[in-house]
Image (spheres, rainbow, N blue to C red):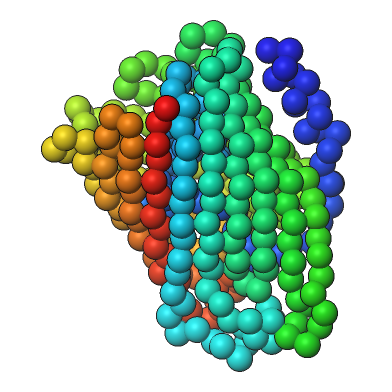
Amino acid sequence: MKIFLSLLLQCLLAFSTFAEKKPIRPWETTQMKSMGGAGLGNLTMINGLYNNPAMLSFFTNSLAYLQINSSKLENATTTTRNSLYGNDTPPKGFTVGITDSSNENKGGVTYQDYKESGIDRKRYGFSMSSLINRDMSIGAQYNYTTDKFKDNSTAPAIDDKFHQGNFSFTYLVSPKLNLSLLWFDPFKSAGYESKSMIASQVTIVEKVLLFVDFGMDITSSLEETYILNWATEINFFRGFYFRYGRFLDRIINQQGYGTGLGYNGERFSLEFAIKNSERKTDQGLFLLEGEKLKETSFSLTYLF
């Protein structure tokens, strides 16, 4: 617990409190893309490594993780994108991560390299979790990010660096229900990533799970920033599973759905996901008028 409190203090001291908003979304795991962005309450080590660090306390294995994302923009407005962002390349990137569960305080490190809306981002992350009791845990995540981008196609490249912290609390209410509270980027170091979420995972019947995430940016109005995501997971035949989910995110003004297939083996797992997004209203920077985004994601996990 002392190590966790020390990490928490360092995160608070390291934050950049103000930064200009940039049209690049936080990284989503293949699990989350297969559920349309839902799954912050998903009781997995991958979720703990990237989104909900409190989850890491409930596992005794360690893992290595690799994920690759690609995408296609339909009806892309090439001229406008080149003018606004310096290029018209759709989002793409990869990440690697590793966890260590050998100690009382569980942790993990990640590296992300991805591009969106003319921004080339590299992010280094460190997560740590500590048990409060057998069924409750708290977690903290520190991210160091470097962004390179252009204000327009003719401007010189700009380099930006910032620090970010995320915090979470998870309660295993029963074998069939868990609840999480999450606070992403409370000091708005990256603008669009700041939000508070309530997430749940419920076992409806054996091998059928339901996920519901709800949240908002508590420094802004509910109407303008609310997020509502839901998803289901169906497990079948020797470790294979199917996921489907829908999302509505007013912070980035997008809605859509995701679907995916996966396999969990004794030592490794494979996942594949497709996520489709469109603008909710006629405003927004991530997707321009008439554009639709189709993302594909593949991941490989090895337990040791």
Is residue 228 in view?
no
Residue 103: percent from left, percent from top: 58, 15
Relative depth, front residue between 299 and 246: 299
Q: Quadrant of the N terminus?
A: top right
Residue 256: percent from left, percent from top: 40, 62
Is residue 178 in view?
yes
Residue 117 higher or lower than 170, as above or below: below
Residue located 32% across and 46% down the image: 270
- Which quarter of the picture shows residue 102? top right
Residue placed furthest toward the front: 304
> Does 64 sit left or right of 259 as displayed?
right
Relative depth, front residue between 63 and 45: 63
Residue 64 higher or lower than 133, as above or below: below
Residue located 16% across and 35% down the image: 238
Residue located 81% across and 60% down the image: 160
- Which quarter of the picture shows residue 286? bottom right
- Which quarter of the picture shows residue 132? top right
Relative depth, front residue between 177 and 82: 82
Residue 120: percent from left, percent from top: 67, 66
Residue located 58% across and 12% down the image: 104
Q: Quadrant of the C terminus?
A: top left
Residue 33 higher or lower than 102, as above or below: below
Residue placed furthest toward the bottom: 79
